[in-house]
Structures are given as structure tokens and as C-alpha cells.
Amino acid sequence: MKALQASTSYSVGFGISSVAPPPIPSHHHRHLIVAKVEPTEKSVEVMRKFSEQYARRSGTYFCVDKGVTSVVIKGLAEHKDTLGAPLCPCRHYDDKAAEAQQGFWNCPCVPMRERKECHCMLFLTADNDFAGQDQTISSEEIKESTSNM
Amino acid sequence: MAITASASVPRTVAITSPSSLLTNPKVSPLSSLQFPSELRVRSRSLRFSNRPRTLVLVASKKQSFSSFEELLEKSDKPVLVDFYATWCGPCQFMVPVLDQVSSSMIDKIQVVKIDTEKYPAIADKYSIQALPTFILFKDGEPFDRFEGAMGADQLIQRIETSLQVKQ
């Protein structure tokens, strides 16, 4: 990161990504090339189950908008795939690999474990304006609400 | 962290907001950072380009800038910048909210979205940590800053209050 800061802004920040360029996606998108990685189905399923269990265990609820829940679950799965641990997808990091090793922001993160604070809006306490009634989410729900991404 | 600087633009396409790209093909007042001008946000076909160093930001009204700083400098209105990431749930929640806010406040502010994974240097420059983080820039400088998802009314309130108080 030091090298980037030394330069003027015109080129460095844009041309360089801290994430490896994603693979060119599949034949489905004939006309639209979207450079975004999808997590594996296996990891999504693992994080979906984890989220349900942890919501129950912590007495928290999913967002009224299950799209939010779905995106976060996929983000956790994506990090699990690329980093080996479900690093919080709602943060910007200097060094994701180091953070995943360190663990503070691995889900369930320390703020959640200590204070039930989840700024991803994945686990919401009942008094939160965005909290719904559900502690479950199906894989169909996840697929449908992220199908436009 | 090891950064490999490559002379040519990597093969990623700067789709900064996939969902709004797919669902909002019409002209939007939002500006997304884009790579060279061959890329048209509103059409559905995008090509990779090997344009090296000069990075062109194409706002949706087709201005081009060589850097984020230039975009801020050249704006005649305050700029609300949304720092987000693809798989951040609250950030995606804000996509339609920002559409609404930027339409209803089109005369008052310009809305720009920055994918922090594609532009980590910009995110670092402004010490972005939690996502989404919103920074309201005035005269090229951060002026107000807040985090988290909220509804359109609340966001409009926050921006208007901020612009009124700090004249």
C-alpha cells in the first residue's frame, strides 16, 4: 500500500486491485460481461447453515429484506473460498489474508460475539428497525434474491 | 501487502454496481468509476480494453476525468460518495435508495459510487473501514461522513441538514 500512496492518484488506485482479477464468467452472459466472482455452492450452503444456527443461538433475527441476508451469506462464502475463513464482507481491509488469519473480523466477529453488533445487518436484535421475524433462510431464497447480481 | 503494479489495465471491467447496471438501463444521475470510454454503462455489451496508464472515469453524463480527485474538483455541486463492496449486504440495500436520492436531489448533489475492492487506494486514502461509508465532499474536501444503511428519507435529511449547517 505504501507504494500506492506515494504516487499521484491518477493511475495507481484504479489499475490495481487487491483482489486477483476474477475469471471471465460463463456462457450464460452472452452479451453482458460481468467481472464478479461467485462463491461456490458448497460454501454458500455452509454459511447459510451457520447463519441459521448462529441467529438461533444468539437470539437474533434476519433482516426484513432477505436480500441483505443473502448478499452477506454469499460474501462470507466468497471469503471462505478465497481466504479460508469467512471474513466480514462489509469492511474494507488493507490486507485481507492477514485479517483472516488474525481473526477479529471472522464471522462471528468479536463485536457480534461481545455486543451483538452486526453492521452487515445479518444478525439483528429484535429491537432493530430492520429486524424481521425469521431465523431461517432457504437456499432458494438466497438464489432468488441474488439472481440479479 | 504485495501489490503487483502492471502497466496495462487488468482485465477486470469496472462494473461498480452490477445490480443497478442490470436493472437500470436508463440514464441515471449516478456516476460510476469506469475504465476507458469504450465502456458504455448503458449498453449491455462491454469489452475489455488494454488502455494502460490513463484512467478515464466516465460519469453517466459522459464527462471524463483522469482521477477521482479531478472528478471532485470539477464538480460544481457537493459530491456524495458511496464506498461499497459487492458482497456487502447493506451496500446492496442502498442501491435503489441512492437512485432515488440522486434523482430527487439532482440539482443539489452528485452521487458517485466507489467499489472499494476495485479502488482500494481511494478507500485507503479516506480511511474507509466499515461499509457502506458515505462521504459528502464539498469543494473537493470531505465535509461530512457517516456509515451504514438507511432509507431514502433519512439519507436526504442527513444530506440536507449537513449542507445547511455547514455553509
Image (cartoon, coloured by chain):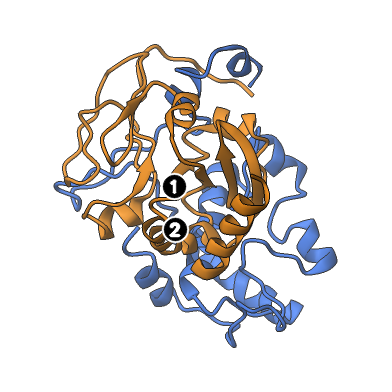
Residue A92 seen in this snapshot:
yes
Residue on which disc 2 sits: B98
Q: Residue at x 70, y 83 (%)?
A: A126
The residue at the far bottom in this view is: A133
Q: Which chain is orange?
A: B
Where is residue A147, by image quadrant? bottom left
The numbered mark, 2 or 1, whose residue comes first in the sequence reads 2
* Kind of residue sitting beneath label 1: Val
Instruction: Specify the label residue A81 is tagged with.
Output: none
Q: Chain of mark 2?
A: B
- What residue is shown at x 43% (from left), y 28% (from top)? B74
Residue position marked by numbered label 1 in the rendering: B111
x and y, in percent, of residue B25 in the image: 22, 54
| Left or right relative to B125: residue A12 | left
Tell me if mark 2 has few (under 14), some (14-19) or many (20+) residues whose alpha carbon lies within 10 angstroms of its own: many
Q: Quadrant of residue A148?
A: bottom left
- Specify whether residue A86 is in view: no
The residue positioned farthest toward the right in the image shown = A114
Does B28 sit left or right of A49 as displayed?
Answer: left
Which chain can be seen in blue? A
Residue at 49% x, 42% y: name it.
Answer: B79
Depth check: B154 or B17 in front? B154
Image: A79 above or below B3: below
Q: Looking at this view, is A125 or A108 the one in front?
A: A125
- The image shows residue A136 at horizontal and vertical percentages of 55, 82
Q: Are marks 2 and 1 in contact (CB under 8 Å)?
A: yes
Quadrant (top left, top right, bottom left, bottom right) of the C terminus of chain B: top right
User: Taking A126 as reference, is A18 left or right?
Assistant: left
Circle 1 crowding by C-alpha within 10 Å: few under 14, some 14–19, many from 20: many
Question: Which residue: 60% across, 20% down?
Answer: B2
